[in-house]
Image (spheres, grey):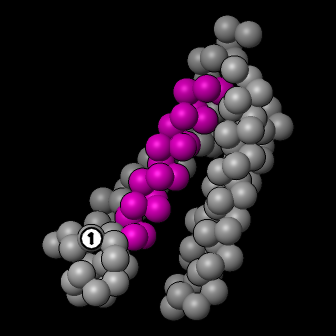
Amino acid sequence: MKVFFKVFAIIFGILFLWAAFVQYNDPDAFLWYAIYGSAFVISVLFALDRLPWMIPAALFVLYMVGVAFSWPETFEGVTIGEGKIENIEKAREALGLLIMAILMLVYTLRTRYIRKLN
């Protein structure tokens, strides 16, 4: 199971690096570079078994706050052309933060509780 989580973290690290890369044309690109970059670093530290559980726990809370603040008033999907572009962009950002939050929760639980059992 340990190998599974290492591979899992490496795959998500690569995905976060890609997500940061595609933000180059976003008006707030540097904010998203920092957000996705932090998730990348945490994934690498987790894969290397060098991650203290408090860091992903704190990021879980921050990402969930970000989800709450960035969720659109009216959810119109995530596909361009299905609604107002502002709502679609906010939904995409919120869902990206939600994915990172869930992953940080997995990292937290794995490092906090499973590491003690090994």
Residue 56 drawn at (x, y percent): 59, 42
Residue lying at 58% horizontally and 91% vertically, measured from the top left = 25
Report the label total.
Answer: 1
**The N terminus sits in image quarter:** top right
Q: Is residue 105 covered in magenta?
A: yes
Quarter of the image where one finds residue 92: bottom left
Q: Is residue 55 above or below residue 76?
A: above
The residue furthest left is 74
Magenta residue span: 92-111
Q: Is residue 115 covered in magenta?
A: no
The kind of residue tagged 1 is Gly
Relative to residue 23, is residue 18 drawn left or right? Answer: right
Residue 5 drawn at (x, y percent): 69, 32
Relative to residue 38, is residue 65 drawn left or right? Answer: left
**The C terminus sits in image quarter:** top right
The residue labelled by disc 1 is 77
In the structure shown, which secondary structural element does the residue marked by tag 1 occupy?
A: loop
